[in-house]
Image: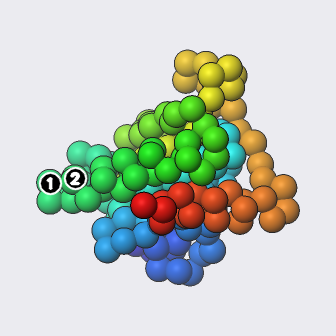
Amino acid sequence: MSGCVFCSIVAGETPAFVVADDDQTISFLDVRPVFKGHVLVVPRQHIVTLGDLPSDLLAPYFAAVQRICVALPVALGAQGSWVAENNIVSQSVPHLHTHVVPRTKGDGLRGFFWPRTTYAQGEAQEYADRIRAALESP
């Protein structure tokens, strides 16, 4: 869809730190992460909300989310992850996306307060490489 930054990432027109991709989804680092290693999972097809996702894409979409959930603790030494999705309200990009955020007890995330951080030069690539390596491990 014209003007959609996630569609532009899917098309390879906008660079992103991609950690996984398959026929139905692509997963990449959020440019304004809650914590470093925060991944967005999006369908390749332009779909705005979870309610718009065709039922035949539910399983592949959430399988991708699940893979990222499993990989983050391995890749980053996190204790777990937080999975979140907005539909319309607080949805900063009108393209379905699920946030998978690495979590560690005492990390400071409370309730629905989403502090944001940034990556130092070259740091995003390092995080993307670590997550991709964990996804490729048996």
Label 2 sits on residue:
58
On the picture, is 57 further left or further right than 47? left
Quick check: 16 left or right of 135?
right
Q: Which residue is mark 1?
A: 55
**Residue 17 percent across, percent down from the top left:** 62, 66
- Foreground of the two, 131 or 39: 131
Horizontal side of residue 98 vs 19, given as left or right: left
Q: Is residue 3 shown to the viewer in this render?
A: no
Numbered disc 2: secondary structure: helix
In percent of width and height, residue 99 lies at 49, 44
Mark linked to residue 115:
none
Classify the position of the C terminus by image quarter.
Answer: bottom left
Q: Residue at x 45, y 37 (%)?
A: 83
Name which residue lies at 46% across and 51% down.
68
Q: Is residue 137 above or below residue 67?
A: below
Q: Residues within 10 Å of mark 2 (few under 14, many from 20)?
A: few
Mark 2 touching mark 1, by CB under 8 A? Answer: yes
- Amino acid beneath label 2: Leu
Whole-number angstrom distance, CA of label 2 to CA of label 1: 5 Å
Residue 22 versus residue 76 in the image, above or below: below
Picture quarter containing residue 26? Answer: bottom left
Q: Residue at x 30, y 50 (%)?
A: 62
Kind of residue indicated by mark 1: Ser
Residue at 31% across, 68% down: 24
Using the image as rendered, state which of residue 10 and residue 130 is in the foreground: 130
Q: Residue furthest right?
A: 121
